């Protein structure tokens, strides 16, 4: 396919502060609803949850393994108010769409995608607890949609947090992440792991989130972004294939698990396959299944090593692990694209870059680079030049210096 002509779209890197967005949602809330319909106007609750990048640990979460995501400085915001009836009225400022339906009977098939997520969260909550009335809400986000930065997990978590605060549900944080993962499985049809929802709910400003996806134990590891930054480059390649290929990778991992269980019945997931077991028997698997297993086993080791490097503020060592993670995702797990590879190579060749890798599910989406602050401008320029030269268009670029955490205001 010939490269498309250069796009004029700006490499949008500036975003308003979360508090400015919260204030605006509050002050403009009434404009979106008909006051005549409300008998009992109550307080407005605003909640937001951030998008995430995975620093290391690709495709390990659904193998019961280890991950190390961090949140970004962009979020999905939800402003909510109780209604005196049992109706739900929601509008999305990004999509310029509004929906209205009965809380007890959401017409899922007729709702647009963003509203399905919101209705799915409420529906799952209703299975566990009583939501005593309808509600109305305004949703706005500045997490790029469909770029692999988990805008959907951010939306789910923001809605769950908002409803929790609005109705005093007293939800546990980990249980909230699990509930949101269920919504993704049931209403979006993607058998995702737990990383995105845990990151959106439990990620902390100034930290990365070391997560054991089997036990759901978390450690908040300081991410020293004083002299360093994260630069995210969006390949802007459509992720159409992502869902089907994602489910295919999961199935391949299950085949590998069944194979290794013959030699050790304790193997329940690829997390349990030791390097020795892999070395001893892996070569008897079909080549592509062997590669998938090798990626997961070694990636789990890299995450543990990476957490250790980060605890010791060793960004050089951490960056080398990011580079190795990308090679493994490209060569063994086969989820990268030529666009992502070109961006990663351009980043790795830039002085001051500690490391770079694709992030998220792959088949399009973004890369993440850990870079010295004084090299950010040069990196952004090089990523743009390289992308225009090879693919005839500019990447989306986002520099993260201060990440957000899920908040109720
Ligand atoms: C997507 C999924 C996550 C995780 C990553 C790959 O983001 O939603 O659960 O599997 O891909 O690491």
Image (spheres, rainbow, N blue to C red):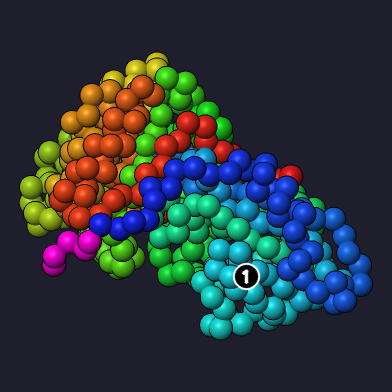
Confirm whether the magenta stretch covers residue 2: yes
Name the residue at the front extreme.
8
Q: Decide: is 393 above or below 109.
A: above
Residue at the image position 79 percent from the left and 64 percent from the top = 30
Q: Is residue 150 among what the camera can see? A: yes
Q: In this view, does 366 lie above or below 208?
A: below
Q: Which residue is drawn at 17% across and 61% down?
A: 3
Magenta span of residues: 1-5
Nearer to me, 391 or 215: 391
The residue sitting at 63% across, 61% down in the picture is 139
Horizontal and vertical percent for residue 8? 34, 56
Most common secondary structure along the magenta stretch: loop
Q: Element under label 1?
A: helix
The total of numbered circles placed on residues is 1
Name the spot of residue 201 as percent of width and height, x first: 57, 45
- Dividing the picture into quadrants, the one containing residue 147 is bottom left
The answer to whether any part of residue 334 appears in the image is: no
Q: Residue 151 location in percent, x, y?
A: 49, 55
| Residue at image mark 1 | 119
Residue 24 is covered by the magenta coloring? no
Could you tell whether 21 is left or right of 310 in the image?
right
* Residue 163 horizontal side relative to residue 189, left or right: right
């Amino acid at each position: 396919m010939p490269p498309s002509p250069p796009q004029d779209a700006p490499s949008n890197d500036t975003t308003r502060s979360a508090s400015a967005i919260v204030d605006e949602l509050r002050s403009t809330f009434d404009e979106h609803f008909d006051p005549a319909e409300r008998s009992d106007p109550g307080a407005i609750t605003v909640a937001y949850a951030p998008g995430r990048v995975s620093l290391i640990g690709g495709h390990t979460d659904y193998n019961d393994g280890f991950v190390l995501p961090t949140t970004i400085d962009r979020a999905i915001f939800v402003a909510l108010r109780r209604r005196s009836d049992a109706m739900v009225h929601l509008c999305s400022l990004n999509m310029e769409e509004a929906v209205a339906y009965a809380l007890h009977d959401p017409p899922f098939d007729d709702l647009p995608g963003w509203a399905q997520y919101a209705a799915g969260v409420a529906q799952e909550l209703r299975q566990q607890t009583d939501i005593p009335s309808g509600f109305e809400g305004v949703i706005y986000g500045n997490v790029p949609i469909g770029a692999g930065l988990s805008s959907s997990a951010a939306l789910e978590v923001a809605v769950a947090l908002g409803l929790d605060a609005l109705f005093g549900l007293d939800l546990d944080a980990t249980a909230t992440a699990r509930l949101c993962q269920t919504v993704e499985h049931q209403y979006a049809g993607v058998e995702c792991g737990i990383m995105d929802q845990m990151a959106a709910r439990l990620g902390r400003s100034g930290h990365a989130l070391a997560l054991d996806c089997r036990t759901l134990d978390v450690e908040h590891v300081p991410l020293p972004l004083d002299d360093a930054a994260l630069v995210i480059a969006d390949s802007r390649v459509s992720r159409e294939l992502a869902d089907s290929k994602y489910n295919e990778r999961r199935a391949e991992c299950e085949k590998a698990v069944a194979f290794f269980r013959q030699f050790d019945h304790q193997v329940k997931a690829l997390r349990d396959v030791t390097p020795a077991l892999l070395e001893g028997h892996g070569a008897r698997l079909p080549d592509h299944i062997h590669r998938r297993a090798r990626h997961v086993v070694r990636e789990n080791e890299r995450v543990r090593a990476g957490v250790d490097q980060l605890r010791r503020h060793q960004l050089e060592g951490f960056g080398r692990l990011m580079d190795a993670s990308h090679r493994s995702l490209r060569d063994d797990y086969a989820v990268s694209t030529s666009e992502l590879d070109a961006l990663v190579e351009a980043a790795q060749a830039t002085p001051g870059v500690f490391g770079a890798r694709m992030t998220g599910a792959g088949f399009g989406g973004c890369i993440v680079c850990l870079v010295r602050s004084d090299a950010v401008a040069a990196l952004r320029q090089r990523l743009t030049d390289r992308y225009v030269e090879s693919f005839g268009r500019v990447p989306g670029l986002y520099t993260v210096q201060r990440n957000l955490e899920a908040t109720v205001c």
